Image: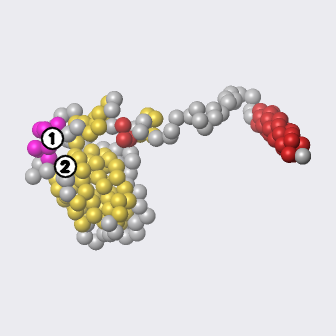
Amino acid sequence: MVMVIVSLLGISCSNSKSSNQESKKQQAKKTAAKTPANVKQTSTPSSSQAPPEKFHHGGMTKISDFVVKVPEDVKTTWKKVVLSIHVIKTRKQKTVVLPIGRKTKIQGTPFKIEVVYFLPNFTMGGSLITSKDNEQKNPAAKVRVYQDGTLIWTGWLFQRYPQVHPFTHVDYHIFLVKGLKK
């Protein structure tokens, strides 16, 4: 009796697999029929073959694979950064000066902001993020934003490219203005 049930289940499963494969073939034919002649069709790789989607600065790379190296002259020169905080509803903005390496409460907002790094001439190559030199040619600051004690955002703010990885919040925008030497 058990053998009969197992046999029936096996037949049922194999029928299901073959009907599933047939269904996929029919779906592919329907898709091909709907695709214009000038559009090239490509097969979709299985999810196990696709790399994990971690997009960073135009490449498929995990952000955790990068090492940040702040040159000694940069560390000794730059002590603070200036951020501009925009309130979306009121269209008002506030400029704040924050020390590098400390978490600071931002008055009039629900945030504490920590400036982790400041690089006056941000560059990234291989697995290294650093500064090409000590001039503010491409300023960037690695920032952590906390709300009610919880980290809600961490990322790089770029002075010249504010649209690259911006701080996104329903009520506020935060932008890097510049670094300060004192």
Q: Which residue is mark 1?
A: 74
Is disc 1 placed on a helix, strand or loop? Answer: helix
Point out residue 60 in the picture as x, y percentages from the top left corner: 46, 35
Q: Are marks 2 and 1 in contact (CB under 8 Å)?
A: no
Is there any visible trace of residue 173 in the rendered image? no
Q: Residue 55's image quarter?
A: top left
Which amino acid lies under the numbered mark 2 shown in the image of this protein? Gly
Residue 72 magenta-highlighted: yes
Q: For this view, does 40 lie left or right of residue 68? A: right
Is there any visible trace of residue 113 in the rendered image? yes
Q: For this view, does 40 lie left or right of residue 52? A: right
Crowd band around label 2 with a 10 angstrom C-alpha radius: few (<14), some (14–19), many (20+): many
Residues in magenta, as a range = 71-78
Toward the viewer: 122 or 47? 47
Total label count?
A: 2
Above or below: residue 177 compared with residue 139: below
Q: Residue 138's image quarter?
A: top left
Is disc 2 placed on a helix, strand or loop? Answer: strand
Q: What residue appears at the point 25 percent right and 57 percent down from the top-left corner?
A: 114
Classified by dominant secondary structure, the portion drawn in magenta counts as helix
- The circle on residue 179 is 2
Which amino acid lies under the numbered mark 1 shown in the image of this protein? Val
Q: What residue appears at the point 42 percent right and 36 percent down from the top-left corner?
A: 61
Above or below: residue 154 compared with residue 76: below
- The circle on residue 49 is none
Point out residue 39 in the picture as x, y percentages from the top left corner: 69, 30
**C-alpha distance separating marks 2 and 1:** 11 Å
Q: What residue appears at the point 79 percent right and 35 percent down from the top-left corner?
A: 21
